Amino acid sequence: MMINAGYLLLDTENLAGYLRGLGHWDDAPIEVREVSDGNLNRVFIASAPDGGRGLAVKQALPWVRVAGPSWPLSPDRADAEARAYRQVADVAPDVIPRLHGYDPDNHALTMEDMSDLKVLRTHLNEGGGYGDASVRIGEFSAGLAFATSDFGMPSEQRKALIAASANPELCKITEDVVLSEPYIEHEHNHWHPGLAELAAKVHADARLRTEVAALRHAFMSDAQALVHGDLHTGSIMVGTRDGAEVVRVFDPEFAFVGPVGFDLGVYWGNVLIAEARAQALGTVKDHAEQIAVSWDAFVSELRRRWPERVDTFFDDAYLDRFLRRVWTDALGFAGTEMIRRVIGYAHVGDLTTLPDPLPASRAVLLLGRALILGRDRLDGPGAIRELVDGLAVGTGAHR
Amino acid sequence: MMINAGYLLLDTENLAGYLRGLGHWDDAPIEVREVSDGNLNRVFIASAPDGGRGLAVKQALPWVRVAGPSWPLSPDRADAEARAYRQVADVAPDVIPRLHGYDPDNHALTMEDMSDLKVLRTHLNEGGGYGDASVRIGEFSAGLAFATSDFGMPSEQRKALIAASANPELCKITEDVVLSEPYIEHEHNHWHPGLAELAAKVHADARLRTEVAALRHAFMSDAQALVHGDLHTGSIMVGTRDGAEVVRVFDPEFAFVGPVGFDLGVYWGNVLIAEARAQALGTVKDHAEQIAVSWDAFVSELRRRWPERVDTFFDDAYLDRFLRRVWTDALGFAGTEMIRRVIGYAHVGDLTTLPDPLPASRAVLLLGRALILGRDRLDGPGAIRELVDGLAVGTGAHR
């Protein structure tokens, strides 16, 4: 299929020449394969035929990849992604892939080859454990929060960051697909036939809708710090290199200055979906524990950085209050992430590949709702643990 | 005093030629007088010798006018002011002065001559009443809030507004002079000698400091809607033209996208300072009533516009919640405005011109503190009325 995008659309045929033209590859032999996996973009891996790590090239198409040209989307999102990688590299260089170059004319990033690593979602679905992932995610989120909030960044510089990080088109996707469509009737939505009644209940749930409106407004107007914006388990890679655990956060094209709790919330939502899957399969469950692990890492890292804050008017008691708000927001956003993965547009393999997706999907939906409605009262990871233990996916005892 | 600013500094000698050069004035005779009154800028009125309304010219100096070149300040703030006038003109053209032109090279605005009107603060200090001012202020704030929030403005356009309205230098002044310095020891601060003990108590008040830190963080990161940013009674003009009441909001150079409650809060703080003055003088008091009047006008106007919202995911119940938040924020910001006018950098004639400023100043300080600490519990204008009636400035019965 050849469609004129107004720029060079990369494919397995032209990628070698492209990389050589940019000086990323010399005359050595090259093998190229496409590994596109996310919803939006094309990804290629170029490597030497004799093995070893090569390069990854990620190109933004002028539309949503999985939807095709009927859902146009500006490829300028690659600008946002390159900008986010550079901003995050200042804060947490060890937890993101190395960016070798960005080609704005063709909306393509040339990056570290991570094909030796595995997407965390896939790894978990195959029964793998988290290793250090939750600790790294908590630290990453805290590092980004500190460095790009009014705590760690001078006021004037932060106003420039907010302006430079405006990401209207990608934010709009989240505002629609995550933070409103699942709660109304919308053509994007779909669900397992056995969930029709529950979906109708969600659409009629005025109390839930108002709480989601509050979370949506926070997403749209709480300019607290730079966030990744899409930190689900499909945006994280894990593996081992030279005997050491490696965790990489990637795909930051949704990055913008928003509520700090958003990233943790999206991560927790997916962790709890993985928990529901594990319960359904009767496999070992260390998922819900990851909320405590990542939250503790987040809090510890933010407290560790706190004495370095540039604005000392923010006192220790205010940090406690801010942490409470991040916690509450994160629970709410976790809930919205869970609900949209069951009755919204983009579902997840964690649930869809289950022999019977229904009990786990119901449990995820109900737990998501409980998190949103109860987020002001759920006062710590222990309270979440109790909710999760009450899921009882395997027994069919959930309502 | 001739100091090279890098651009034409206007004065009463060169203003006529300046206006003629820009085509704002023809060959007709012209009289020029300087009427600079605010802290930051120079203002001139050009008029025909035979009277009638002329033109006002406001120029930003490269420093704070009342402090001189030792406190430099970018004259680009005039850009922010011209931009704000244009943005507000789209929303509430009748309540701001007409902008005839903006000269970015010389940081000068040519505007409606309002010398027939009176600054509301002066008018009140002379014993005048509010007339329609509080209704207009409530409507103005609601109109601006609706049109430039995620309720009234499409998401993508709003991201552009936030970026375009970044106002780092002027916001920093508020962050410092209003929202931190009065609560710490700082060379900018000064107070009536009789307040030394109370000022020391404020500086040692950890609970108050944490609450102000929360308000400060809201000011710095809650990008809810465009706000005027300095809506005290010295930024409002009142008078009569052709038998009709006229209210004008001016000096919007502090405008930025921030918490909606900020403007009402600054207004209320000054209204309550006027109340304390009236109590001290034993004059008629309709001041505290203005909180109810302006709040009712704000709520009515926002509810009137609500059905036109562009984003209908925000439901009626969320509007109620948002209004509650605006109310709470406004009380907090009112408190910070009151405290900074007594023990901060820029004091107000309402208090300083009293025969004995002490009792009223004490009352303002204590009421400001009560508003900040009690803002979550004070559930309506009636609760403020009770607090105000308890001031008892004239009797010395306040603690």
Image (tube, coloured by chain):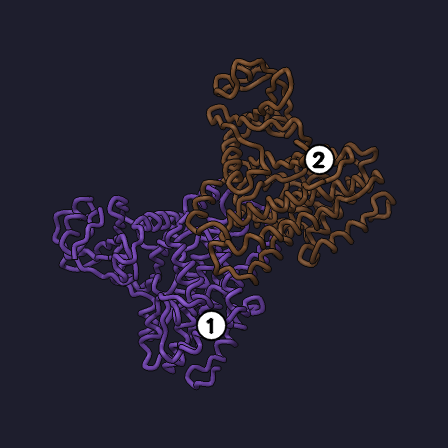
Chain colours: A brown, B purple
- Give the vertical position of B226 relative to B370 (above or below): above
Could you classify mark 1 by the number of other residues whose Cα lies within 10 Å: few (under 14), some (14-19), or many (20 or more)?
many
Residue A144 coordinates in the image, percent (x, y): 55, 45
Res A171 quadrant in image: top right
Q: Amino acid at mark 1?
A: Val
Residue B211 coordinates in the image, percent (x, y): 53, 65
Q: Quadrant of the N terminus of chain B?
A: bottom left
Q: Are marks 1 and 2 in contact (CB under 8 Å)?
A: no
Nearer-the-camera pick, B298 or A21: A21
Going 45% across and 66% down the picture, which residue do you hit? B336
Nearer-the-camera pick, B315 or A394: A394
Task: Kindly report the distance in space between the C-alpha atoms of the residues bearing marks 1 and 2.
Answer: 53 Å
Q: Amino acid at mark 2?
A: Arg
- Farthest residue, direction right: A395
Q: Which residue is mark 2?
A: A121
Residue A128 coordinates in the image, percent (x, y): 76, 36
Would you say B143 lies left or right of A321 here? left
Residue B234 appears in the figure: yes
Residue A180 appears in the figure: no
Q: Which residue is mark 1?
A: B202
User: Which element type, helix, strand or loop, lies under badge 2?
Assistant: helix
Nearer-the-camera pick, B111 or B165: B165
Going 64% across and 43% down the picture, which residue do you hit? A136
Res B393 quadrant in image: bottom left
Going 64% across and 23% down the picture, which residue do you hit? A35
